[in-house]
Amino acid sequence: MEKILVGTEELERHLGDPDWVVFDTRHDMTDTDRGRRSYAAGHIPGAYFLHVDDDLSGRKTGTNGRHPLPDLAAFAAKIDARGVKPGTQVVVYDDLNGNFAVRLWWMLRWLGHEKVALLDGGWPLWDHEERPVSTAEPAPRKGQFVAKPHLGETVDTPFVERFREDPSIVLIDARAPDRFNGLKEPIDPVAGHIPGAVNRFWQKNLQPDGRFKAPAELRKEYDALLGPHKPELSVHMCGSGVTACHNMFAMALAGLAPGRLYPGSWSEWCADRSRPVSARP
């Protein structure tokens, strides 16, 4: 099994290693240009920037969620132009405890590239430890990236509409409890959650210092959450299919099958006001 979490010390040892490629995915949903500005001000040397909206998402139709998956060929070309080939060790990071970087981690694995890891502690820890920083944008590098998508690792809205009739399926929502319970909704037009879903706030995967909990601790927590359900039959969602990948990453770190992603998530579900919604009274 490939390593999916690397530390700052290990990554620093591999700066300049042609067999390692680093991606910076810093982002802010309320200021979508902040990631680019942060990258320009300083990033891990050699890291390429990928924008959550422009590079890791596709065209929005108004009914397919806020971060639909991108065109596979276009995304694969971007990865190829940054030097990723079979055997390349990819490392991804952001400045929000992996909240956005996990989307790229999941996408690369979804397209068949298994050697991809998250930087534990991300940019804040790298910066705090005063490790090398660069403002230079690396030149394009020709890779040999070949997308081999695992299409069975996603589900669509019709599947989710049927899931409540299948007791073997568990739908895990990664949003904050207040949003899940419909007590507030700062982003989407409808508050609440899909009836039957369970809540696992993505930040529960972390220690107070922003690094991931130990695999054994995560395993205990997810075993309790899943109960009798098989982890491979779990379906993950959030507001728009990004943060949901954090729970999938945590399950993989715990040695569990991470399940499947509902890319449209709540933003796609609630775009149709006829779909059922649950919320705390």
Image: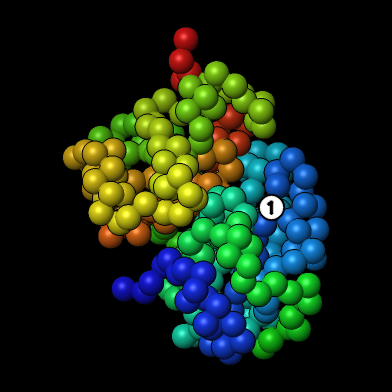
Residue at the limit of the structure toward the left, as seen here: 228
Task: Please name the residue shown 54% across and 55% down the image.
Answer: 98
As displayed, is residue 119 above or below residue 167? Answer: below
65 left or right of 89 in image = right
Image x and y of residue 152, in percent: 40, 59
Which residue is labeled 1 in the image?
Answer: 27
Image x and y of residue 196, in percent: 37, 28
Task: Please name the residue shown 45% across and 44% down the image.
Answer: 208
234 left or right of 130 in image = left
Task: Note whether residue 154 is visible.
Answer: no
Image x and y of residue 84, in percent: 58, 81
Task: Note whether residue 95 is visible.
Answer: yes
Pick the front one: 228 or 96:
96
As displayed, is residue 3 above or below residue 247? Answer: below
Secondary element under disc 1, as helix, strand or loop, is loop
The image quarter containing residue 6 is bottom left
Image x and y of residue 251, in percent: 34, 53
Q: Quadrant location of the N terminus?
A: bottom left
Task: Please name the residue shown 25% across and 54% down the image.
Answer: 216
As displayed, is residue 76 above or below residue 106? Answer: below
Residue at the limit of the structure toward the top, as seen here: 281
182 left or right of 171 in image = right
Pick the front one: 230 or 91:
91
Which residue type does callout 1 highlight?
A: His
The image quarter containing residue 267 is top right
As displayed, is residue 181 above or below residue 154? Answer: above
Pick the front one: 24 or 10:
10
Pick the front one: 117 or 256:
117
